[in-house]
Amino acid sequence: MSPLSLEEEYQNNPCLRREDISNLKEWLTQHPHLPAVPDEMLIMFLHACNYKTDATKHTVERHYSLKASAPEVWSNRDPSRPEVQRALQIIEMSALPSRDPDGNLVLVCRFAEPADPSRFVHAEAAKAYSMFHDLSVWRAGLVPGVVMVLDQKGANLSLVARLNLSVLRNHLAYLQDGFPGRIVNFHVVNCVSVTEKLLAIARPFLKSELLEKLRVHGSGMESLYKCVPREILPTEYGGEAGSFKDLHSKTIEEMKLHRDWFLEEEKLQINESKRLGTDKKSKGAFGIVGSFKKLDID
């Protein structure tokens, strides 16, 4: 069930216009390679793109093209599958219970302790993390923005050797161009000796909009507290939100409870055989030139 009440959104959200949704639905019928995106998702895409319909169309195209291009990440997104269960034992994730002062959703990801990067399989981790952030944003509804926190504690050269550049490129492209949410900031905390190497690998795939949002905080928490209030963070980060392990356990339970949502959402797929000639110039996940979705909030 969608967290959005369509009628309430139309009544209470001055930025949301019925004619924009009608425009997007009509556009979908003219591009038969795209799936029949539900109204609730169209509203989330529109909100993510600051209610700009042209940007929304590009983001919808990218969303489904990128998912089709990396089935190892975006297919079989069933929380009960072994690869997902393995990944959830290696990395821990939580959407924090409280929002930041601007109402933004805060997503935190770290290695489980004790960290064992030698068990890290990049495609499996990317699948689990994508399931987590997609479900978290969908459950949160039309939040002002999303703040992502990536904890580097436990990362080492073994992790660097296990990175899959194709998976990394796809996932970063999705977050920048196909994500149905507004990324406000991306924080890297608890930096270790290989952090700069990891960032150097990722930078070629980052557009200027996301690079401007990237905040690297070193080994201490004080600079993070200036961006994310200390009290809303887990106890392991000096906050009052409870144990991160407990929060991660709740994440796993939410993913299990929403198994049907994942299975239904996965049915929304691009069909390249139906792509019309006028669309063929943008065929493929990386065939569209330029950045269509700004990551800042107007």
Image (cartoon, rainbow, N blue to C red):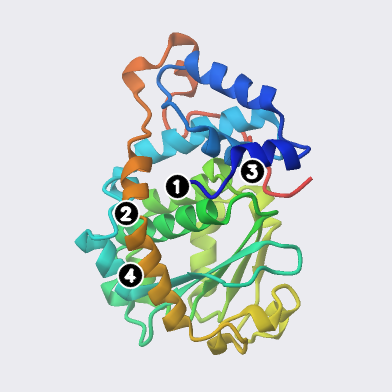
**Kind of residue at disc 3:** Ala
Nearer-the-camera pick, 217 or 141: 141
Mark 4 closeness class: few <14, some 14–19, many ≥20 residues within 10 Å: many
Left-right relation of 211 to 40? right
Label 2: state its secondary structure.
helix
Which label number is shown at residue 88? 4
Residue in the picture at 42% in, 82% down: 245
Is residue 293 something that shows in the picture? no
First of labels 1, 2 by sequence position: 1
**Kind of residue at disc 2:** Arg
Q: Which residue is mark 2?
A: 259
Spot occupied by residue 25 in the image (x, y as percentages of width and height)? 55, 22
First of labels 3, 1 by sequence position: 1
First of labels 2, 4 by sequence position: 4
Label 4: state its secondary structure.
helix
**Kind of residue at disc 4:** Leu
Q: Are marks 3 and 2 in contact (CB under 8 Å)?
A: no
Spot occupied by residue 192 in the image (x, y as percentages of width and height)? 51, 81
Q: Which residue is mark 3?
A: 48
Label 3: state its secondary structure.
helix
Which label number is shown at residue 1? 1
